[in-house]
Image: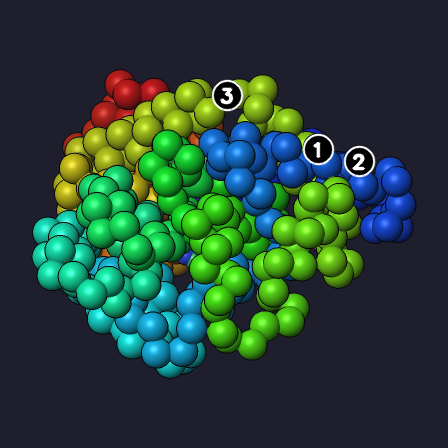
Amino acid sequence: MLMIPGPTPVPEKVLLAMAQRPIGHRSGDFSKIIAEINEGLKWLHQSTNEVLSLTVSGTGAMEAGIINFLSPGDHVLVGVNGKFGDRWAQISETFGLNTTRITAEWGQPLDTEEFRSYLEADSNKEIKAVIVTHSETSTGVLNDLETINKYVKAHGEALIIVDAVTSLGAYNVPIDDWGLDVVASGSQKGYMIPPGLGFICVSDKAWKAYETAKFPRFYMDLGKYKKANLKASSPFTPPVNLMYGLRVSLQMMQRESLESIFSRHQRLTNATRAAVKALGLKLFAADDCASTAVTAVDPSPISAEDIRKIMSSKYNIALAGGQDHLKGKIFRIGHLGFVSDRDILAGIACLEATLMELGHDVKPKAGVKAAAALV
Ligand SMILES: *Cc1c(COP(=O)(O)O)cnc(C)c1O
């Protein structure tokens, strides 16, 4: 049982859809599948912009989001309060962008005021992009994208480039309403399908920037993907079977509705957090900036790795560990995608049993009781 923030559980219906013979990707039948998927992706992104599908992991979509819209030496502001914000900064630096890191301690949200002051001071409009990780998966912190984006809009010039890998499909990200320019995501997170596809949703303003952007690009030249999208085609061979699965997972999501998907993720988050507290463990992110995809837990003085080991060996539940300097210090519970109330109750019950086995003083049924009250 996967309780990590990606890859996430895949419904049987999706697995069965993928267990078919691949067909030719240039056939009329496949073109129909692409057309249906493209409509579904626009629905999921709450956008009339084209959503482009690339055969890459999420990081590939992030890199495409940089190289297609910026040029060497451009000044960018990058929010860094965890592993994935740091990844954005590393990509920017690798390509020679003039990168200003706006940092916050891991576990804390980005300070929106810092973005405001940089943007307001930039009267020559040299800042070309503000790059933000919405849900910082390494710490379970949801950054205040809406507020940061308001300052970007007041600036007028800069693009807002977003990693929505663990917020899309778990939290309301109204791309057109907010006017987000470039939004990257990946298949193994909220999409309920295996890893292998990266997605990128691009605004008209970003397409204007694309025309003058100067990084070399070939496979990840998004212009090729846009052109193909408009003909319900793809520039290169897509992962045909993964697309069979995506078609079904998008149908499932549409049947559930965005509103229900978001409220389910919120409910699972609330239940998980209440249970963690009731079990006497510390939540790594505060209530007012909690990601609805993943909950990070600081179990000290109990060892996070001991907890993960027992959860895995005895109950066959995979929890994620900490990354970089948080390795061994925290564990992370994923509740993203194809996750139900039952899954959370089962996971919490096993966590409770694990803590008892480790000699932690747990009030009987405290975790399950707290979670059950909220599902
Ligand atoms: C998973 C994830 C990514 C992408 O990682 P890949 O391994 O390249 O798919 C990017 N950002 C966040 C916030 C993530 O959770």
- For image coordinates 47% across by 46% down, the residue present is 203
* Residue type marked 1: Glu
Q: Amino acid at mark 3?
A: Ser
Q: Residues within 10 Å of mark 2 (few under 14, many from 20)?
A: few
The answer to whether the residue labelled 1 contacts the one labelled 3, judged by CB atoms less than 8 Å apart, is: no
Give the CA separation, mark 2 to mark 1.
6 Å
Label 2 vs label 3: CA separation? 23 Å
Q: Is residue 164 above or below residue 330?
A: above
Question: Within 10 angstroms of label 1, few (less than 14), some, or many (20 or more) residues?
Answer: some
Task: Choose the circle earlier in sequence order: 1 or 3.
Answer: 1
Q: Position of residue 65 (x, y in %)?
A: 47, 60
Is residue 7 visible to the viewer in this orientation of the structure? no
Whether residues under marks 2 and 1 lie with C-beta atoms below 8 angstroms apart, the answer is yes
Q: Is residue 192 left or right of residue 322?
A: right
Please name the residue that numbered disc 3 is placed on.
257
The numbered mark at residue 36 is 1
Reading the image, the residue beneath label 2 is 32
Residue positioned most to the front? 124
> Within 10 Å of the Cα at label 3, are there few (<14), some (14-19), or many (20+) other Cα atoms?
few
